[in-house]
Image (tube, rainbow, N blue to C red):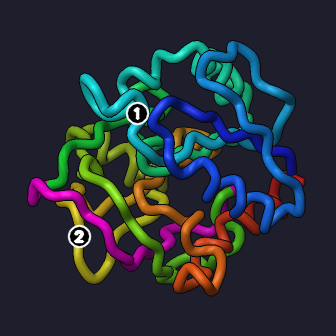
Amino acid sequence: MKAAVVLFPGSNRERDMAVALERATGEPPAIVWHGDTTLPKVDLIVLPGGFSYGDYLRSGAIAARAPIMRSVVEAAERGVAVLGVCNGFQILTEAGLLPGVLLPNAHGKFACKNVALRVETSQTVFTGGYEAGQTISVPIAHHDGNYFADDETLARLEGEGRVAFRYVGGNPNGSIRDIAGIYNETKTVLGLMPHPEDATDPSQGGTDGLGLFTGLANALS
């Protein structure tokens, strides 16, 4: 599996993501600058966490209009897998690749801790390393992780099996229906608020996030 990680001004999890991808694939990903206009030929595009452009306007709003995003959108429309984590999830919603919006946390504070997630389905390129219904523990680190969508959008997400992960044992940000991650219509684009890349080695306190990357490697190789 060949992967590319897009680097925006203010990204801060690109190295964590690159290490997790190399751990799963044995090959370092390409790092693509936000000002570039073309992507290398890859099987997976990743938008990492951080505070792109200082979160001005809204989290992810400026990054969604960066030059490279036209190529990301075009690749996604061709069926290339795209993963957006935390700020990357925000960018995907702002770019129109995923529905809904990420609002400030309901409690008004930055949330940074481990959370429990339930894997809603294992039948995607992202979740083949897990069992449906499995509970995993991964960290969060965000201020604007409160997912919201209107009733019609939520009914469509639920009916089409497009909720990827839900918080269990406590909702850390007020996200509607405990949603932690969602897919696009073809389940080739995933937006996820928690950070699986920071749970891929025992020295990080756990390896529950590794299944996402090994699952991707197996599905896309």
**Which range is magenta?**
106-125
- Identify the residue position indicated by label 1 in the image: 93
Residue 53 place in picture, x, y as percent: 39, 27
- The CA span between labels 1 and 2 is 21 Å
Mark 1 residue crowding within 10 angstroms, few (<14) / some (14–19) / many (20+): some
Residue 89 as seen in the image, left or right of residue 213:
left
Tell which circle, 1 or 2, labels the residue nearer the N-terminal end.
1
Q: Amino acid at mark 1?
A: Thr
Residue 97's place in the image compared with 215, above or below, is: above
Residue 195 location (% of width, % of height): 49, 62
Position of 16 with respect to 57 (left or right) is right
Q: Secondary structure at mark 1?
A: helix
Q: Along the line of sight, which residue is nearer the eye, 11 or 134? A: 11
Q: Is residue 145 left or right of residue 64?
A: left
Image spot of residue 205 (x, y percent): 53, 85
Please report contact status of discs 1 and 2: CB closer than 8 Å, yes or no.
no
User: Quick check: is 120 in the magenta stretch?
Assistant: yes
Which quadrant of the view contains residue 110?
bottom left
Secondary structure at numbered mark 2? loop
Say the numbered circle drawn on residue 66.
none
Task: Name the kind of residue labelled 2 in the image.
Answer: Asn
Kindly identify the residue that appears in the image at 69 percent across and 13 percent down.
37
Give the labeled residue for mark 2: 171
How many tags in the picture? 2
Q: Nearer the viewer, residue 135 or 150?
A: 135
The residue located at (50%, 40%) in the rendering is 11
Magenta residue check for 180: no
